[in-house]
Image: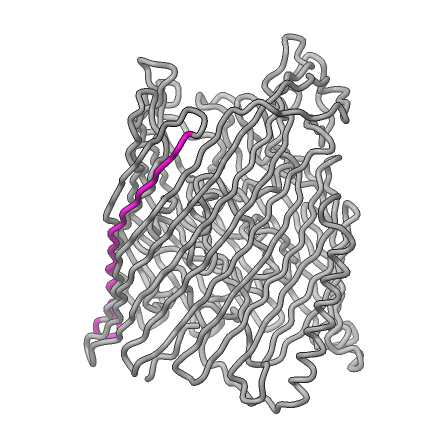
Amino acid sequence: MMRLPPHRRPVSERTLLLVGGLILLFGNAASAQQDAAVLDQIEISAERADGPVNGYVARQSSTASMTGTPILETPQSVSVVGRQELDDRQVQTTTEALQYVPGVFASTSAVSRRFDYFSIRGFDATLSGMLLDGLRSTTAQSYVRYQPYGMERAEVLRGPTSFLYGPTSLGGAVNMISKRPTRETRREIGIQTGSYDRKQLQFDLSGPLNDDEKLFYRLVGVGRLSDTQFDYVPDDTAYVAPSFTWAPDDLTSLTVLASYTHDVFGPPRPYLPIQGTLLPNPNGELPWNTYLDGSDLHNSNTQANLGYEFDHAFDERWSFHSAARYTRNELTTQTLSGMGLASDMRTLNRTAYQFGIVGDILSTDNHATVDWGTGEIEGTSVFGVSYRHTKEDYYLDYGRAPSVDIYNPTYGTGFYAGTPFTRTKQTGNELGLYTENTVTLMDRLVLDLAGRQDWAWVDTDDLLTNTSANQDDNAFTYRAGLSYLTPFGIAPYASYTTSFLPVLGTNFYGEPYKPTTGEQVEIGVKYEPETFDALFTAAWFHLAQNDVLTADPNNPLNTIQTGQVTSRGVELSASVNVTEAFRLVANYTYLDQEVTESTDPVALGNRPTGEPEHMASVWADYELVTGPLRGFGFGAGLRYIGSSYADTANTITVPDTTLVDAALRYDFGKQFPDLDGLQLSVNATNLFDEHYYTSCSARSCSEGYDRSIIGTLSYRW
């Protein structure tokens, strides 16, 4: 069979009016195209790796393999959150998208919404483990935040991913897959309101632009003005993402993807003392949602993306894929940062900081794919090259700031940070050569062999001291895996994978750090029943991260690399489309982490801080399809986050928590044909308003999200 190409604040009411105008403009254009063209029926015979998911059960993943290997045959754990689940739960952030994924601890605090913080299998993946359409758009300090409404699916590959994507987190990677233009006309507009005076307008328009249906478009947008559970902390955004696809024939396609996002939020991780929150304070307990940073601070991030994806099939065996994206991130942050409590245990000393980051990233990936073999042995091989260039300008200024009474905070005292502290310019280049090979023997035994050689060069100029530091690292990483496909849908597997990630900076003596490396052994089983639509997985894993930074026992000002952290655990997951109207996901994670090598005797043998030992979740959604109540839908979810430790000695415990989410919706068209396409939904997260901490250190704590209720009225036509 021939292979087809794979396919307030600065944000004001003016933004919402602009969004509305774009809806009318593109909506009318799409309507005219629909009237002018008769669309052919399209029969979807299989799920595309970057396309819609059938309910809650995905069969393909573009993240876990470049050879088109189905999830069942992939010898590594992968989860896919599709558009249906994102809509049912009305996901607003990447953090929310990951809350029902095994092995992932989504640790974004309620007050710090700059980015989505998360760890996978116990290892932080916020910076180096975030991908968009298979490409990474971060620098050493410029993080990203992607808009879930603009995504078709969120994929999580757990365990090392360097063998495909170069320098990345040992724990795994999250790959957000953008919505793409569609041949059929689709139009949706929605308004949201809810907790904290939320006002949001969103739209999604797609369809052909010409009569022969060789050129089609998509335009997605979100405009939001919202407060949060904290005074002086906004949650505003403006997002627009146009894309176009040109497909002159069935063998060739070119898609141009662009997006612009401007987010306005609060200061970075405001200081909330652990004394008075998790630990006692002689002055009493602090009120929930205490905010100790400043008012009238400017904190925003602007991100622009422009890229393309080109696919061409030469014949039945050979195809070619090329993708590239340019990203610019601009972050500005102001904070009155807490430095510690005075002896009276109520006066918080503070320092004013202002910093800015401008990051420019060019990422590209190109690979050829060939299908080979016949009969007893068949295979698919990929040969590729990737390149990433980054440039980052960073400054940090500081100044004196008044102290604050944590039990009676006052605001509006002004902000000044005029003393330069840091000025750096950093450029980086990463080059990778890779291959992946999937070989199937007798339709039962699937061998996966992938290898990649990476080179990374980083130059850092200190503009205050006129000094420079250079790092030159390289590594070979790989995955070797084996799966066996039984006749009854069960696929046991085993794999060994390795990772590589440069550690930027130098020690006290000016010596550059070595890259941190890691390895994982994973053994598991996957099951796709023949009698109903579901995917069940069970995995045991053992990861070890080497050359972890640790304290120098001979010099308190120095940091050395003699540490090792191991992570062992079990993950269980189920994704089931019980019927077309009844869907559910359920997961459980057991994580046993240990600091196995360290120069710090207090940390040695203990668990790293901030990582729960147990996590579990279940979400179910059901819609009534018959009777007088047909059109009503109900959803409910339960999330359990186990206890963790706040200190390296493991003497301060962060309590566990259980959170309940719920959803209710009504499809008017099921009862009233004239209102076809109109839907009202109400979603609640943390329904019972449980107070909990996302994480704590030995000095401070971060509070979790209070109950939030969002109502959405949407219309599709």
**Foreground pick, 624 / 238:** 238
Q: Position of residue 475 (x, y in %)?
A: 24, 45
The picture quadrant where one finds residue 39 is bottom right
Q: Nearer the viewer, residue 678 or 555?
A: 555
Question: Taking 230 as reference, is 21 above or below it?
Answer: below
The reply to whether residue 573 is visible in this rendering is no
Residue 230 location, x and y as percent? 72, 36
Q: Position of residue 309 (x, y in %)?
A: 43, 68
Determine the residue positioned at 71% across, 32% down.
Answer: 289
Q: Quadrant of residue 78?
A: bottom left
Most prominent secondary structure in the magenta stretch? Answer: strand
Front residue of 612/141: it is 141
Answer left or right for 348 relative to 562.
Answer: right
Q: Quick check: 518 above or below 101?
A: above
Is residue 428 inside the magenta stretch? no
Which color scheme did the rendering employ for the protein? one colour
Which residue corresponds to the image point at 66% horizontal and 12% vertical from the top-left?
345
Where is residue 709 drawn, in percent x and y? 74, 51
Classify residue 373 as left or right of residue 130: left
Question: Which of the 4 image quadrants contains residue 550?
Answer: top left
Q: Residue at x 49, y 45 (%)?
A: 359
Q: Is residue 396 above or below residue 712?
A: above
Quadrant where the C terminus sits is bottom right
The quarter of the picture where the N terminus appears is bottom left
Q: Is residue 410 visible?
A: yes
Left/right placement of residue 525 relative to residue 575 reads left
In this rendering, is residue 523 above or below 657? below
Total number of numbered labels?
0
> Is 445 included in the stretch rendered in magenta?
yes
Q: Residue at x 52, y 69 (%)?
A: 53
> In this picture, which residue range is highlighted in magenta?
441-462
Give the left or right position of residue 111, taking residue 330 as reference.
Answer: right
